[in-house]
Image: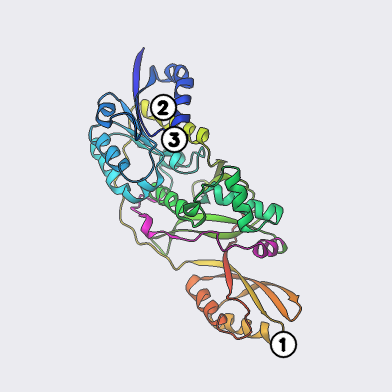
Amino acid sequence: MTSFSVGLLGHGTVGAAFEALLAERAEAIAATTGRRPELSGVLTRSRGDFDDILARSDLVVELMGGLEPARDHVVRTLEAGKPVVTANKQLLSQHGDELFGAAHTAGVDLRFEAAVGGVVPAIRVLHETLAAAEVERVHGIVNGTTNFILTEMTRTGASYAQALADAQRLGYAEADPSDDVNGKDAAAKMTILARLAFGAAVGLDQVTYEGIEHVTSADIAYARELRLSLKLIGTAERVDGGGLSVRVHPAFLYAGHPLASVDGSFNAVTIESPAITEITLSGPGAGGSQTASAVLGDVVSAMLPPPVPPAPAAPVEIVSDIESAFYLHLEVADRPGVLAQIAEILGLQGVSVKSVVQEGLGADARLTIVVHPIRESKFLAAVSLIGRLDFLRVPPRWIRVIEEVFE
C-alpha cells in the first residue's frame, strides 16, 4: 500500500489533536482511500523547515493561525501544485481572492471545512451537496463563545461580565476574547460562507458586524416576556434584486426559528433555497478534537480524486440598508405623554409598533417596544430623534428581531 505524506504547519491545540487523530485513524483511511496518511514533518516556531516539509509532502495542513507566514506558506504550497487544508478563517476572509486564485490556477484543492462551525459540515454542503441549488440566504450561529455567553445569561440571569468570566474559566473563551465578542470572528466566517453560497468576492472589510458587549440582563429578561431568545446571528443573503448583504449582529428569534434552540457552545447554519426550502446543520463549534476531526475530513476528501478547485469569485454590490424588525429599550421619566411622543416619532418615520411592555420604576419607567420590519435607516432616524427627548434617562438600546418561523 502506498503512503500519503501530510505536512503539518502549526502544533497548538488543534495541531496536536490533528496529529494524534491522524495516527489513530490512519488504517481506516487507508482502507477507504488505498493510501495510508502519515506526517512528513511538523513546522513550529522552534522546529521544522517549511521548504523541506513542502518538498516531502503530498498535501499541507495549515493550522498556524494569523496572516503571516501562513499566507506565504499556503500560496507557495498551492503554486507547487499541492493541495492545502486550512482552518484559518482570518486568512481566508482577508486573502481569499489570492488563495482561491492560486488554487484555481494550479488546479488543486484548497479545503477549509474547519474554518467555519467546527464539525458542522456547512462548507461541504454548500460546495458539493448544494452546488447546483440557487441559495437565497445563509445564516447561522457561527461563534461558540458568544452563544455560550448568551445562553448562560438567559439560563442563569448572569450579567454579561459574569457569563464571559464563566466562558473563560471553562475554556470556551480566550484570555483576550475581543474578536469573538465584538463579532469579528463571526464576520470572517460569514465572508467564507458568502463566497461559497453566492460565488461572491466578499472581504472582511465589507461585512457590517456588531458584538454582544452591550447586551444586558434586562434585555434578556424582557425578551422572555416577549417569548424571544437572543443570539449572535451571521447572515449572507441576496437583496434588492442582485445585491448581497453580509452582516453579523445580535438578534432576537421567535421560538419557531430553527436557530432559536441552539444553545451553549454549539454552532448551527441554516441554508435557504427554493429547491430545498431550508436545512439546518448544527453541532459543536469549538474544541481541539472537534476542529481536528473536520480538518482530517478535508484531508481524506483531498485524497480522493479528482480535486475540485474553486471557481474565481465575482464582484457584487454590498447592500447595508436592509429591512428588519427591531427591539427598542427605553428608560424614561414616568410622566404623562411619554409614550405618545415616542409613538409619534416612530410613526413619522413610518415605523409600526408590534408590541409594548411598560414597567414602572418609582418615578421612572422602562419601555420595551418591538416594531414591525422597516428599513434600518428609517428606524435609526427614529431612534436618533427619540434619543434627543428630555425625558430619556439613558440613551436608547436596540437589537434586531428575526421574525421568520419555519414550519
Residue at numbered disc 1 = 336
Q: Which is closer to the viewer, label 3 or label 2?
A: 3
Q: Is residue 170 visible?
A: yes
Residue 53 at what x, y percent from top left?
A: 29, 27
Mark with earlier residue (3, 2): 3
Q: Is residue 204 left or right of residue 405?
A: left
Residue occupying the point 46% across, 44% down: 116
Residue ranking furthest to the top: 1
Q: Which image quadrant for residue 102?
A: top left
Q: How many numbered circles are shown?
A: 3
Query: Residue 300 bears which disc, if any?
Result: 2
**Mark 1 neighbour class, 10 Å CA radius: few under 14, some 14 to 19, many 20 or more:** few
**Mark 2 neighbour class, 10 Å CA radius: few under 14, some 14 to 19, many 20 or more:** some
- How far is the residue under mark 3 from the one under mark 1? 61 Å
Magenta segment: 198-224
Residue at numbered disc 3 = 12
Q: Work out whether residue 48 or residue 237 is closer to the camera in this orientation and state it.
A: 48
The type of residue carrying mark 1 is: Pro
Q: Is residue 318 left or right of residue 225?
A: left
Query: Residue 247 bears which disc, if any?
Result: none
